[in-house]
Amino acid sequence: MLLVSVCSLLLLAAQPAVQSAPQRGGILRVALRAEPKTLNPVTAVDAPSRDVLRRLHADLISIDRRSQQTVPSLASSWTVSGNRYTLQLRPGLRFSDGAPFGAADVVFSFAVYQDEKLGAPQRDLLTIDGKPIVVRQTGPLTVEFTLPAPYAAAERLFDSVAMLPRHQLETAWKSGKLRDAWPLTASPSSVAGLGPFRLKQYRPGEAVVLERNPYYWKRSGGETLPYLDGLEFKVLPDEDLQLARFVAGDLDLLSRPSAKAAEFLRAQPGVEFSDLGSSLEYNFLCLNLTPGNPKLKWFGQVAFRQALSRAVDREAMVKLAYRGHATALWGHVSPGNKLWFRTGMPQPARSIAAAREQLRAAGFTWSNEGSLLDAAGSPVAFSILVSASSAERQQMATLLQDDWKALGIAVTVAPAEFRSVLDRVLKTRQFDTCLLGLGGMGDADPNPEMGVWRSSGAMHLWNPGQQQPSLPWEAELDRLMSAQMVTVNHAARKRLYDQVQQIVAREQPMIFLVSPNVLVAQRRVGNFRPAVLDHPALWNVEELYLRPDTKR
Amino acid sequence: MSARACLAGLLLLLVAAGSLTPYDPAKQQREEANAAPSVQHWFGTDGYGRDVASRFLAGGRWSVLAGAAAAAATLGLGWIVGSAAGWWGGAADLVLMRVAEVCLVLPWLYLLLAIRALLPLETPPRTAAAVLLLAVAAVSWARPARLVRGMVLGLKERGYVEAARGFGVPGPVIWWRHVLPGTLPLLFTQWLVLFPRFVLLDVTLSLLGLGVAEPAPSWGALLVPLKQAWMLPREWWVALPALLVAVFFAVFSLLARKSTNGVR
């Protein structure tokens, strides 16, 4: 009998995990890297606050994190007529305090976000060509948005713009006190939203606890969502601590652990570890092409930039800096960006010989000691500015230093505190080259990166804020970016943006290196469908559930 | 004698061994990255495939020399300021000691961050690290200066100093020939206290990514993998440099204590 029981247990254990029917109840415990600063969507700029707020609030139209396409959210449908978007809201929606939601709340929310005095981070997105989007209520559940100029994929603007409860915040807004509303210490009953959860408790320095929103509108198979009773965000500022707590069973999932932790997590029993592939982030070396930079005599030559790129060992970066959990890049759009990645981009293999030949053809020579000399006989030497707090980027900088030593270039790696790096790159422009990352976890659409690729942009890192594009290919980039911004047809837009990618990859004002992969780990979370876009693990939190043996 | 000889031997060994490294400490062998200890690589290889033993020895030579130089600079400055304040007293003493108090309360970490941010980016890694260490030395003289001042105040009341005065020996000569030599034992013990502190400072700066930059080897950079303690069960050998650094400080501390017994 005992033998039969043991055999049965062994057989059960040997069976592959079966996706069970969703279970209701339980608290999902996740980590935050820092304590949120606020519960106010109008002032929140830090990632921890946004992570919490996106579970408390909802937007009109969302971007599905898996397909990267827009899907209805609080608005059940919308129509487009020229620059006018008309959104139809779902009937019967209620805030988490039971108050009804309607078109007046939408108009109020956009008025708040567009209020110049409040300086909400959403305001820039809701301003096109320097003019605000005009929002008008046309019925109890109908809102009309008139764009001041044509804007492609404008419906993506609505993603993550949280709808605010007019009945709770209008008084504070009118009295000029909205910035102070909804601090972390706010009473849970005073914070109403349309998200799957509502505030239950804030324990300073320890955790933010959310509970199920009983008025949440989404259903699955006739059953109300979310499945979870609650969500606990634990403040754990250190990755080592997060890993220890995860292994000890105090956390149910980990979002974006470092690549170095991957093997450790894989080895843990009961942990499902996923590498989702390339993120939208692109790491690159930016060359300072600002007029007056003494190194412009080298950096200004496209052959020099291309030779530098040709000598880079991207595979070593993937293997050594990210332990294989990254993707080599030759352009700024990573393969993780399903809608905009341009397939068939040239990916020239690393070749020191080809790089040297390219330099020779451009008039460079070598001294007897092997140092690279420019046409005037000056030795080529420059520095790489890198944040001291990023181990991966420091490692990439050291690999670049060694790669370019093979070309005879003396490269100094200059680690600096992150704010000092930003200061030099964005303000003083006192740097030769800088290793940075962009793209993050934001939208996959090109429009949020207008400031990077247009010559007048503040984030046009190699030579920002130009009155007129200084180079013909920059003028072409300006034209293509402006054209794609107002082209509504996706295929036509894609063709324009493909050209942008082609020009950037050819001219190499930035030398693209790698895109880190999105990593997630979880133990026994049902309906877990991680995605590349933010938040990789919690984007469908209303559908997540805990398998029975982990309920608390 | 034996303790001092051992101490000197330890430091000399480290300095000499730094130039006898089995591999070029900066040479990357990327296909051999993160390798476990072996006959070829006693402490394994780092994330670039560089020999960790060679980097430990080369990094140790730098740390020892830089620590010794910074400690000497601190003591030199403290010696001059402290003895001058003690010998001349009055307004000079008042001003110098107030300056010393200001130096004592300076937040040196922020000072270092500011200096590092102001240095030209192409400053060679070791020059940058040396500048930072000297900057700390330049504000660390206050404590030894106060000790020297106290000693000089006692020494100048001694009989032989009084006698020299009585014979009409000029003040600066008395200061130089009869007072300063009396402070030398204090300087020796202070050097033994300050030297490991500066070595540790060099290690800390490199650990924070603000000390000796790549590709130059440093002890602090070798300790960086230990920030991810969870890696230890898989790559236990990354702890070897830390153990050796700890042994160095323990042995130094033991020998230093023995060699100062005679001074007391």
Image (cartoon, rainbow, N blue to C red):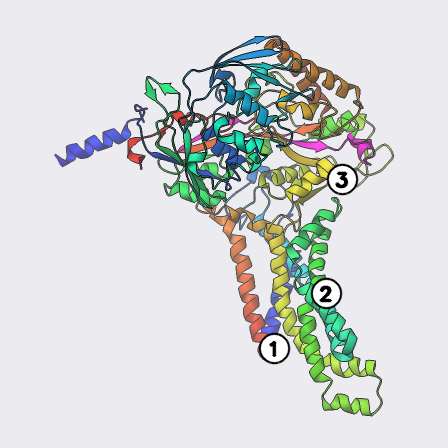
Question: Which of pointers 1 and 3 indicates the residue nearer the eye?
Answer: 3
- In the image, is B119 to the left or to the right of B255? right
Q: Is residue A283 magenta?
A: yes
Disc 1 marks a residue whose amino acid type is Met
Magenta part of the protein: which range? A272-299
Q: Which residue is mark 2?
A: B73
Residue A416 lies in quadrant: top right
Q: Quadrant of residue A234?
A: top left
Badge 2 or badge 1: first in the primary sequence: 1
The residue beneath circle 1 is B1
**What amino acid is found at the position of numbered circle 2 in the picture?**
Ala
**Which amino acid lies under the numbered mark 3 shown in the image of this protein?**
Gln
Q: Position of residue B167 (x, y in %)?
A: 83, 92
3D distance between C-alphas at marks 3 and 2: 32 Å
Mark 2 falls on what kind of element?
A: helix
Q: Are marks 2 and 1 on the same chain?
A: yes
- The image shows residue A399 at horizontal and vertical percentages of 64, 38
Q: Is residue A272 left or right of residue B31?
A: left
Q: Which SS class for mark 3?
A: loop
Residue A544 falls in image quadrant = top left
Q: Quadrant of the C terminus of chain B?
A: bottom right
Q: Chain of mark 1?
A: B
Image mark 3: chain: A
The number of callouts visible is: 3
Q: Position of residue B114 (x, y in %)?
A: 70, 50
Q: Residues within 10 Å of mark 1 (few under 14, many from 20)?
A: few
| Residue sitting at x 31%, y 37% | A552
Gap in Å between the C-alphas at discs 2 and 1? 25 Å
Residue A81 x, y percent position in the rendering: 59, 7
